[in-house]
Every structure is written in C-alpha cells, then in structure tokens.
C-alpha cells in the first residue's frame, strides 16, 4: 500500500467474501491496520465492486482472442494489452452508478440488489 499510495491516501477494499473474512485474513488486517485505511464494505456485496466489471470485460475479451493465451505469461501479456485498449471512460458508467448502487443496497438492507 505504501508503494502504490505513498501519499497515505490509499484505502484497502474487500467484499467480505467468506475467504476474505477468515480468521487469518481478519487477524492480518487487524495487525496491519495502522499501515492503511480499510474501507468497510457491506458483507458479501460484490455487486458494489466496480473492479469486477472491468475484470469481467477483460476476461470476456481474453476469451475472444485468437489464438488464445496458452501460458500464464501469455495471459498476463494479453490482459495488459487489452487493459490498455479500454478507453479511459470505460469505468465512468460504473463509477456514476455508485450512488444508485448504494441506494439499492440501503433499500435491500445489505441484501442482494439488482446490480
């Protein structure tokens, strides 16, 4: 975190999925809590994570590649190339949808939403 956000403004975010909320992960987060801010995310709410939108788009684009990547290095190269091809505005729609996503989450009291 200190390398990526040397200004100290970075926040750690995770969706509280079962593996992320394990005793080991929880203990690590507590032990390192002074190293970064931890954004408290609603439990098991991946539909609130716009990073998953980008991941899904990248995976879909990789599946369309011909020839498909055959090695981990081929996959890494393909992902890096494809990510550079996405216009900067690509995440603008999900970012702009966050107020609606949060409103839906509040109405659902943290339960599933239409997102």
Image (cartoon, rainbow, N blue to C red):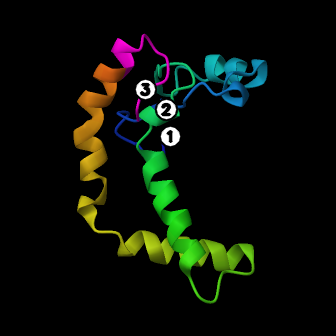
Q: CA distance from mark 2 to mark 1?
A: 8 Å
**Residue 84 position within the rendered picture, expressed as x and y whole percent measured from the top left:** 39, 73
Magenta span of residues: 105-115
Q: Position of residue 31 (x, y in %)?
A: 66, 19
Instruction: Kindly give the residue lying farthest to the top in the view shown.
Output: 109
Disc 3 and disc 2 in contact, CB within 8 angstroms: no
Residue found at x 51% / y 34%: 46
| Mark 1 neighbour class, 10 Å CA radius: few under 14, some 14 to 19, many 20 or more | some
Disc 2 and disc 1 in contact, CB within 8 angstroms: yes
Return the residue nearer the eye: 111 or 53: 111
Q: Seen from this angle, which residue lies furthest front?
A: 114
Is 7 part of what is drawn in magenta? no
Q: In the rendered image, which quarter contains the C terminus?
A: top left
Q: Going from the N terminus, do you reach mark 3 or mark 2 first?
A: 2
Q: Secondary structure at mark 1?
A: loop
The image position of residue 101, as x and y in percent, is 32, 29
Neighbour class for label 2 at 10 Å: few (<14), some, many (≥20)?
Answer: some
Disc 2 secondary structure class: strand
Where is mark 1, residue-wise?
1
Q: Which image quadrant is residue 9 in?
A: top left
Image x and y of residue 86, in percent: 35, 69
| Residue at which label 2 appears | 12
Residue at image coords 56%, 82%: 65
Query: Is 115 positioned to the left or the right of 46 in the image?
Result: left
Instruction: Give residue 48's quadrant in the image.
Output: top left
Q: Which residue position is annotated with label 3?
A: 113
* Residue 112 in sight in this render: yes
> For the point 70% across and 25% down, which residue is it?
18
Residue 67 position (above or below residue 96): below
């Amino acid at each position: 975190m200190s390398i990526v956000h040397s200004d100290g403004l970075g926040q750690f975010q995770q969706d509280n999925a079962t593996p992320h909320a394990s005793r080991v992960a929880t203990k690590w987060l507590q032990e390192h809590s002074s190293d970064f801010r931890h954004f408290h995310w609603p439990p098991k709410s991946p539909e609130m994570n716009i990073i998953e939108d980008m991941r899904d788009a990248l995976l879909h684009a990789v599946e369309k590649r011909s020839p498909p990547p055959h090695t981990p290095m081929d996959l890494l190269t393909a992902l890096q190339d494809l990510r550079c091809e996405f216009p900067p505005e690509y995440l603008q729609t999900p970012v702009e949808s966050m107020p609606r996503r949060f409103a839906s989450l509040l109405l659902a009291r943290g339960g599933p939403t239409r997102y």
